[in-house]
């Protein structure tokens, strides 16, 4: 049996869902893969940092986080003041980075992932920022250190698109892709098909936790653009920054537009695409943006 | 650079397509994976067996096979009389088995794959028979020998379903599946939607090489049943023989049935499904057969 020590940077919806999944799969991981785990560190955004190299009580950490309480009380060796302290002191084998995305620079996640690889950890992120801003650097560093830089859930998180290509289609060359990669705008546009206004549809998406308080990352197309950039960077081996993606949001679309199109058997979608051409990568190989 | 020695059992459409793909990817395999290959043996169904431990001329083998000529002239050491001889003498690292399916027993492919694993080869098949009749045995034998038993193209051959679960979703438990797994019947039913008769649609499918001269394996649902059995056996860890699958073919469906359904916005499909229930595996978790 092997015990893997884990650390979390970020303990919001994504981090907590992963923690609950690990607890639910604990018996299966042990019986099927002879794998046990221990969580040695958790850094939250605004509720302290917990550090215990012998293993934190993950159930208790979840309860504290859910209640909005501070997690630093779980620390046995003095709570680290900043995430970088936790990385240096948590002695983890694997770092799960899941802090909010920074579309422009990928920071500070990029620095945190680099530091965890330098410390000999596998670095896993749910954050698209470091993928589009640091894929080649972090992949090369991981290789040098004999570790992995992984980021499966950053795009199409219910479907393992990156490991599909890496593990199952290693000889395939991706020429183009096209699809809906942002589910928030897809929900909003679908609700607008019933005549609901754009503003009401956004409010509904916020009420069920799909859209953020500031929904601009989704509705202005930034989330879609960064996903196009991530797919192109990783699967088409063509580094592409989000700002270079021909980007349209859905802010200007009215429910009249949407219901009118529906009458003609058409639907508005935020379509993401890219094509590799002899002239280089072309984000948008069919009428881009909406269709 | 590593040179991998390959042998083919079966050199029909599937084997020749693989050979052409290997030739087309030769440069990429070398530059991306430092892998070269050499084909040391090819056993055809009725046009002889070629054996050369130093490597056959694959282009020439393809030309001979395409022309319907005998391949044994390529043998440098005396052509093996039967495939089992080839397996014993070809000194390959990997055997590609792609002979026609035997739904009832999986033979003789099962014996050939077992023998190749015993000889220390990786055994790869495009044949569903040995998967449903020998998955556990061949997988255990491969493990014992430090080799792999692989069969990715047996089901949903354009999509890597088995390696998706094995490599990308190792902690996931498949509870149920549902879909169209046989493309021949799907083509026939689609053509019947235009009013074409069942017989004419079958003849068309034969004319483009999709349906076989004896199309009963597809139209009586055997191909679909063996695919259900393969998915259940491998992905749901529940051995299931094709005969145990609740099976319907499409032979009794008329173009009137199909066009009539279409008027009501419905379509006839040969739907494959299975669900894991507390009472065991249930092939067909929704109205089975057609819907």
Image (cartoon, coloured by chain):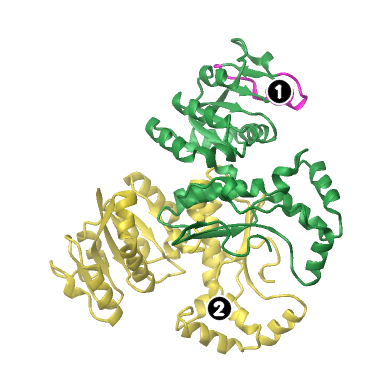
Chain colours: A green, B yellow
Residue hosting label 2? B219
Instruction: Please rate how many residues cluster around mark 1, counting C-alpha atoms within 10 Å: few if below 14, some from 14 to 19, many from 20.
Output: few
**Where is residue B127 shown, x and y percent of the image?**
42, 65
Q: Quadrant of residue A197?
A: bottom right
Q: Is residue A99 left or right of residue B73?
A: right
Label 1 to label 2, Cα distance in Å? 62 Å
From what the image shows, is residue B216 above or below residue A48?
below
- Say if residue B92 shows up in the picture: yes
Instruction: Please rate how many residues cluster around mark 2, counting C-alpha atoms within 10 Å: few if below 14, some from 14 to 19, many from 20.
Output: many
SS for tag 2?
Answer: helix
Residue hosting label 1? A46
Chain bearing mark 2: B
- The quadrant the C terminus of chain B occupies is bottom right
Residue A61: within the magenta? yes
- Which segment did they paint magenta? A53-70
**Where is residue B112 shown, x and y percent of the image?**
32, 62
Chain bearing mark 1: A
Q: Quadrant of residue A21?
A: top right
**Where is residue A144 shown, x and y percent of the image?**
37, 32
Q: Nearer the viewer, mark 1 or mark 2?
A: 1
Q: Nearer the viewer, residue A121 or B14?
A: A121
SS for tag 1?
Answer: loop
Q: Nearer the viewer, residue A37 or A12?
A: A12
């Amino acid at each position: 049996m092997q015990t893997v020590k884990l650390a979390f940077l970020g303990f919001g919806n994504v981090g907590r869902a992963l923690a609950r999944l690990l607890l639910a799969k604990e018996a299966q991981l042990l019986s099927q893969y002879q794998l046990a785990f221990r969580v040695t560190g958790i850094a939250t955004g605004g509720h302290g940092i917990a550090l215990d190299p012998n293993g934190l009580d993950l159930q208790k950490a979840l309860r504290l986080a859910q209640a909005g309480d501070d997690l630093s009380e779980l620390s046995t060796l003095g709570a680290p003041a900043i995430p970088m302290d936790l990385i240096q002191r948590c002695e983890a084998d694997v770092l799960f980075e899941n802090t909010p995305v920074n579309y422009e620079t990928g920071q500070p996640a990029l620095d945190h992932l680099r530091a965890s690889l330098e410390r000999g950890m596998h670095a896993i992120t749910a954050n698209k920022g470091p993928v589009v801003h640091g894929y080649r650097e972090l992949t090369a560093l991981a290789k040098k250190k004999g570790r992995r830089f992984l980021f499966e859930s950053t795009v199409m998180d219910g479907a393992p698109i990156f490991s599909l290509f890496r593990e199952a289609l290693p000889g395939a060359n991706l020429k183009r892709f096209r699809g809906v990669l942002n589910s928030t705008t897809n929900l909003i546009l679908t609700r607008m098909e019933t005549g609901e206004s754009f503003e009401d549809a956004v409010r509904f998406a916020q009420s069920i936790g799909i859209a953020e308080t500031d929904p601009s990352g989704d509705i202005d197309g930034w989330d879609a653009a960064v996903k196009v950039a991530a797919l192109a960077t990783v699967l088409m081996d063509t580094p592409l920054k989000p700002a270079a993606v021909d980007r349209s949001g859905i802010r200007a679309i009215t429910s009249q537009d949407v219901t009118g199109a529906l009458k003609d058997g058409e639907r508005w979608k935020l379509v993401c695409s890219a094509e590799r051409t002899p002239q280089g990568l072309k984000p948008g190989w069919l009428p881009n943006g909406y269709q």
